[in-house]
Amino acid sequence: MDALLNIEDLRTYFFTEAGVVKAVDGISVTVDRGEIHGLVGESGSGKSVTALSTMRIVPRPGKIIGGKIIFDGTDLLSLKENEMRKIRGGKIAMVFQDPMSSLDPLYTIGNQLVEAIRVNNKEKSKQQAKDEAIGLLEAVGIPEPARRFDQYPHELSGGMKQRIAIARALSRMPTLLFADEPTTNLDVTIQAQVLDLMKDLKQKFNMTMVLITHDMGIIAEMTQTVTVVYAGQLFEHADTRSIFLNPKHPYTEALLKALPRLDMRRTLVSVPGNIPNLINPPSGCRFHPRCPYAIEICKEKVPQVEDAGNGHLVACHRWKELSLVGV
């Protein structure tokens, strides 16, 4: 396959007064051109920080301290800020988790879209940008787009605000789109509409997409490949079918056991415990305090990422001997 994005051994730490938070601590991700790639794990696993690192917008006191981020043949970490600015929002864009925090309540929807369209394209007139913005609103399914153009974010529903956030991300026709929990805080019906919209837009605009979520149901519906991350590290990577039918890592199995099923053949099982403190993470495998299969080596030695065959990657000491449950 043709890799569009190749993240290698990325390390992004937050230097706080309490200590160094190792939010991303050696994650590697490969995203092929034209696919929808899932980045899945519980809150605090490092998913969003990986995306922010790729766009080089990690908030203070965070800092990328190591690794490579190769996008379309270019190492983004080697670029100067003015060079990166041309890629950010243009070739790579992001739909943030909460549209109310990313949309400015003081400006109309139209003003925010026009600004995004003209930021690196000043030769476009405001009228041209307005026409384009209204076209984007129509493309993302906003009714009466010309009227919505002059409204403020607070006048719109959560689902419409998320559609507008998607329209803004698409305003410069990116090659790669990160979607960070795009259906959070939306009711089930609107969630389904937003996911269908994203699939349609992916086809229409020929984009590559990285979908960040904790929801394995969304992963099953939307993605072709999946990277499972935990406590800032890669635990498993494979095509979506293999992840669901033949998981290799106990954490992946735990996520699948927590997935509701219509046939209810088994009882839902929550993952015991919580994500560890990343200032002082557990020794060995970071999942071992919560893992029902952990043995002494799991507590003492960090597992290396191994190829289980056909590009199915796993970081677990016991993956060869365990028979884990898929769906």
Image (spheres, rainbow, N blue to C red):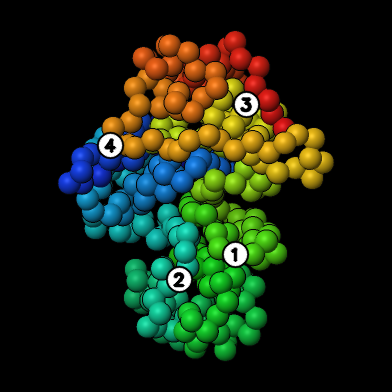
Q: Earlier in the sequence, mark 3 or mark 2?
A: 2
* Amino acid type indicated by mark 1: Leu
Within 10 angstroms of label 3, few (less than 14), some, or many (20 or more) residues? Answer: many
* Amino acid type indicated by mark 2: Met
Residue picked out by circle 4: 279
* Label 4 close to label 2 by CB (< 8 Å): no
Mark nearer the viewer, 4 or 3: 4
Residue at 34% over, 22% down: 283
> Which element carries disc 2, helix, strand or loop?
helix
* Label 3 close to label 2 by CB (< 8 Å): no
Report the disc number at residue 186.
Answer: 1
Alpha-carbon distance for marks 3 and 2? Answer: 36 Å
Alpha-carbon distance for marks 4 and 2? Answer: 30 Å
Within 10 angstroms of label 1, few (less than 14), some, or many (20 or more) residues? Answer: some
153 and 311: which one is in front?
153
Alpha-carbon distance for marks 4 and 1? Answer: 33 Å
> Which element carries disc 3, helix, strand or loop?
loop
Residue at 44% over, 84% down: 108
Report the disc number at residue 247.
Answer: 3
Q: Earlier in the sequence, mark 4 or mark 3?
A: 3
Q: Earlier in the sequence, mark 4 or mark 1?
A: 1
Query: In the image, 30: left or right of 65?
Result: right
